[in-house]
């Protein structure tokens, strides 16, 4: 089963911590999924970083997925991949990575969430729930009401994403999300470990055994 606290590493919202630093600090803070995301690294450099993070995740018994790049995920031994709308299809990723790989599908609308639910994905990443500073968005936030609508309509676990902070976790989880994915609240923090711990505690309020 997919974990409930996914930290997406990002070195554009800050420049102090590397991807590997962020993965290590997030894992020590209680993240059970690390997603490596970088739009600028070459595939070779991404594989090198991915192999470092693979070791980190093994040490902390966390899942490791790569954003977008299916072949990179395969080469660095990741547990799976998270796919955006412009990336490879879920079927294509499944053929490359196999039946046991974790494959996440992005959805920005109710209809996209339904399509993801009918695919071979393992979870739906739905958002952005709130306004976010980590990525430029052309559309407004979907909000809690639409998140709740999606969560009640799909059978796959839903990881909510977009502007989620530890103070907002409870509302997101009450809307029906299985878990949360976070970038800025951890990566742009002065203390990513402590920021992850706050999110983990907030999730545990709703799911005490998470």
Image (spheres, rainbow, N blue to C red):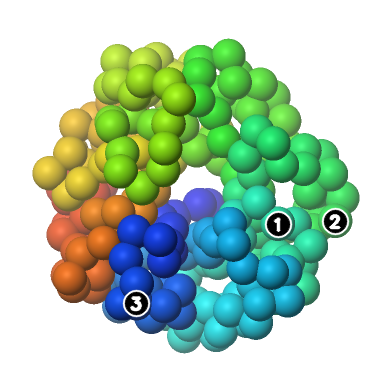
Pick whichever of labels 3 and 2 is earlier in the sequence: 3
Vertical placement of residue 25 versus 91, above or below: below
Q: Position of residue 80 (x, y in %)?
A: 66, 59
Q: Position of residue 111 (x, y in %)?
A: 58, 14
Q: Secondary structure at mark 3?
A: loop
Residue that badge 1 annotates: 69
Q: Residue at x 45, y 74 (%)?
A: 19
Report, in whole angstroms, how far the alpha carbon at label 2 lies from the one at label 1.
Answer: 11 Å
Tally of numbered tags: 3
Vertical placement of residue 162 versus 52, above or below: above
Q: Quadrant of residue 45?
A: bottom right
Query: Is label 2 in contact with label 1 (beta carbons under 8 Å)?
Result: no
Which of pointers 1 and 3 indicates the residue nearer the eye? 3
Residue that badge 3 annotates: 17
Q: For this rendering, which residue is in front, 3 or 195? A: 195
Q: For this rendering, which residue is in front, 186 or 140? A: 140
Q: Residue at x 24, y 70 (%)?
A: 192
Q: Secondary structure at mark 2?
A: helix
Pick whichever of labels 2 and 1 is earlier in the sequence: 1
Q: Position of residue 170 (x, y in %)?
A: 18, 38
Q: Among all residues in the image, which is located at the extreme left?
A: 167
Report, in whole angstroms, how far the alpha carbon at label 3 lies from the one at label 2.
Answer: 31 Å
Residue that badge 2 annotates: 96
Q: Position of residue 152 (x, y in %)?
A: 42, 18
Q: Residue at x 70, y 65 (%)?
A: 73
Residue 201 - label: none
Report, in whole angstroms, how far the alpha carbon at label 1 lies from the one at label 3.
Answer: 22 Å
Vertical placement of residue 54 versus 78, above or below: below
Q: Residue at x 21, y 42 (%)?
A: 169
């Amino acid at each position: 089963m997919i974990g409930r606290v996914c930290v997406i590493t990002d070195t554009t919202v800050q420049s102090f911590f590397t991807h590997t630093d962020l993965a290590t600090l997030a894992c020590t803070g209680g993240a059970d999924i690390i997603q490596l995301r970088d739009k600028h690294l070459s595939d070779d450099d991404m594989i090198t970083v991915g192999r470092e993070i693979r070791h980190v995740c093994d040490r902390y018994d966390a899942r490791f997925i790569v954003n977008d790049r299916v072949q990179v995920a395969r080469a660095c031994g990741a547990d799976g991949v998270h796919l955006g709308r412009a990336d490879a299809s879920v079927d294509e990723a499944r053929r490359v990575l196999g039946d046991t790989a974790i494959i996440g599908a992005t959805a920005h609308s109710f209809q996209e969430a339904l399509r993801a639910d009918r695919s071979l994905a393992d979870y739906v990443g739905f958002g952005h729930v709130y306004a976010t500073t980590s990525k430029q968005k052309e559309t407004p936030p979907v909000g809690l009401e639409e998140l709740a609508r999606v969560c009640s309509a799909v059978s796959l676990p839903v990881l909510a994403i977009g502007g989620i902070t530890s103070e907002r976790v409870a509302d997101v989880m009450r809307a029906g999300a299985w878990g949360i994915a976070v970038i800025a609240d951890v990566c742009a923090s002065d203390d990513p470990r402590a920021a992850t711990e706050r999110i983990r505690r907030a999730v545990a309020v709703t799911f005490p055994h998470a």
